[in-house]
Amino acid sequence: MRSDLFSADHLEKESAQPGLRLQNSKLLKAELRGEFMARVGSMVAYQGQVQFEALGSGGIGKFIKQKLTGEGVPLMRVRGQGDVFLADRAADIHLIDLDPGDALSINGGNVLAFDSSLSYDIKMVGGAGMMSNAGLFNCVFSGQGRIAVTTKGSPVVLNVDQPTYVDPQAAICWSAGLQTGYHRAEQLGLGTLLGRTTGERFTMSFAGQGFVVVQPSEEPPGGFLAGTGGGQQSGQGGLLGNLLGN
């Protein structure tokens, strides 16, 4: 049988080292010799002796936070010996390696898989969370290991070495140490009062030292209280604030 389908470009890529790696731009391959975490329903194929265990959001604390915030990652633990292939609706996949001391704030909807050595928590986004892709909250990953994130289209990575502003519906992830806020991009005037708008009323602002990943697609805002007014940092009191602070 002959076909371009059987060319080297489409054959399974082999490696002597276990771990997460790209089969291609839209398909993640995990050479499994132990375990890793993945988004529920992301497996498209596997070979070998592999077991899948549903974890919800990853522990009772994260389960409660997910229910309160609408943010989180529905997880499954994948363990065994073999090769596992994962994808998410043909989205582009990118690998990020975290070192000790690193922390990444990311919309939970863009998390595909990560090493079990990494830990994550659900945290409030300062300043502009109510308008961001993730809503008021984001997942913050830390530790040492690799995480696979998805974007719709090829992203741009902005180095925050000057005031940086991003459409909140296009921001995928950023260095957790950055200061976030919101900035009114559209000037108020007679046109605004008459209902004419540029569609760019607010942008998300970033300051400090780090990076922001921006995809060429705008996701509708999501998450707990998405689209509501008010500063979320002033609302950290009470049960919700105490829970998220843990």
Image: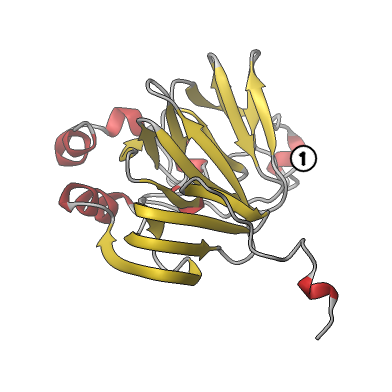
* Mark 1, other Cα within 10 Å: few <14 / some 14–19 / many ≥20: few
Q: Is residue 64 left or right of residue 19?
A: left
Q: Amino acid at mark 1?
A: Gly
Closer-to-camera residue (20/6): 6
Which quadrant is home to the C terminus?
Answer: top left
Q: Is residue 175 left or right of residue 212?
A: left
Indicate whether 191 appears above or below 3. above
Q: Is residue 83 visible?
A: yes
Question: Residue 143 at x, y = what percent?
Answer: 35, 30
Q: Residue at x 47, y 63 (%)?
A: 84
Q: Residue furthest front?
A: 16
Question: Residue 59 at x, y = what percent?
Answer: 19, 51
Closer-to-camera residue (13/26): 13
Question: Residue 49 at x, y = what percent?
Answer: 36, 70
Closer-to-camera residue (167/23): 23
Residue under pointer 1: 191
Question: Residue 187 at x, y = what percent?
Answer: 71, 29
Q: Residue at x 47, y 45 (%)?
A: 107
Q: Residue at x 51, y 42 (%)?
A: 131
Q: Is residue 203 visible?
A: no
Indicate whether 40 appears above or below 171. below
